[in-house]
Image (cartoon, helix red, strand yellow):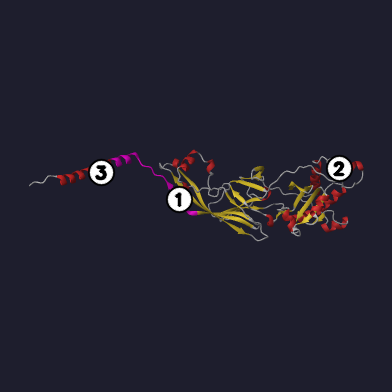
Amino acid sequence: MLDLHCDYVSVDVWDALGTNRQNVTKNVEKWQLDSEGTRRIFSGRNRETREVQHQEHDKSLKELHEEHGGAYAVDLTGDTFDEFLKENEMAFIDLYAPWCVWCQRLHPTWEVFAREADDDGMPVGVGKVDCVAQQHLCSKLRVMAFPTLRWYHKGAPIAPDYKLDRTVAALKGFAKRKLEMDEKFKDWESKDKDNGEKRERPIRGLAEMNRPEHPGCQVSGHLMVNRVPGNFHIEAVSKNHNLNAAMTNLTHRVNHLSFGEPMETQNRKTKRILKQVPEEHRQFNPMDGGFFRTDEFHQAFHHYIKVVSTHLSMGGGSKTNTMTAYQFLEQSQIVYYESVNVPEARFSYDLSPMSVVVQKEGRKWYDYLTSLCAIIGGTFTTLGLIDACLYKVFKSKKL
């Protein structure tokens, strides 16, 4: 997946017998990719996504605003966003959608965090963006899920986005760690205590601790499925976010896809057999290296696969020269989704009721002896006939 973060990648399996497995993690590995498509960070194997903790509040967001005499977290728009980042070299922004249940739970916590950060003199600008009202801005910022909590330094986002617990203590701890990374502001808290009173916010700064992060993920492993029609699909899902359907891009490359035992792990016997199979009967992984690009949102490729069992018998009649493999034919097409639905890359498979038998038959040694005798006998007979004809033609006639 070239434009989907590993945190949001889910592999699901469904078949005609009723199997419905969500977010399969067993025998599935995820690797985060860099901008060149090279594996960079191992993102987990056989690991469930941790659910973040939310803080409960007795008062609603409206009641907090009334109690504090207004909002501490600044509402930002496309016109004020860049100006806010210029005024606050260090900023923490909540990119949310009003319909998102996780965002609704976060609102009171975010407001309390903004107030306490201001009371502590923390040199952090705390803001929020409504991505429904400011859709163009959030598309420009490539917001893939709600809520997205993003740290900015001198107008540039610091990757990765915040993914820890959504409590006031956790948010303040994260902000303090960011400050401690900066040479200029690592002692800001002790300076506040020395002054003994709240001070005006200084010019803010943060060390360049940005770690480049590209939203690409390599998914590898194997799935155990029933021998019935079904599908496995890769989609964007999160336990802690609502996905932004308008920004879900499922462009992908298939490095390898096969059914049955992987060819690269076969023993010497299997490799010997496959070496003798004609090229036209080697359709074991025709999708390898395929690139499936979607240029617009709300669309994804669906792949339809017909699996044909192939019985290989490369002579001798013994089990050492026989094996079963699986060839398949594939067709792909783009499927369009409604704007509210999150696309998925689907691989639908069906097993053919027919099988292909590839058999190599050798000749016994006595077949060659029999053929040789037949050739000699045929040659002798033919020469005899020719001799008889010539004798009749050239025999002298009696007067």
- Residue 368 in magenta? yes
Q: Nearer the viewer, mark 1 or mark 3?
A: 3
- Can residue 60 be spotted in the picture? no
Are circles 2 and 3 on residues that touch, CB within 8 Å? Answer: no
Q: Across the whole image, how many numbered discs are drawn on residues? A: 3
Which residue matches tag 2?
A: 189
Left or right: where 364 falls relative to 238: left
Are circles 1 and 3 on residues that touch, CB within 8 Å? Answer: no
Sequence order check: which comes first, mark 1 or mark 3? 1
* Magenta-drawn segment: 352-372
Sequence order check: which comes first, mark 1 or mark 2? 2
Tell me the residue at 32%/41% (across/down): 367
Dividing the picture into quarters, in which one does residue 318 lie? top left
Q: Disc 1 and disc 2: Cα gap in Å?
A: 74 Å
- Mark number, residue 378: 3
Q: Disc 1 and disc 3: Cα gap in Å?
A: 40 Å
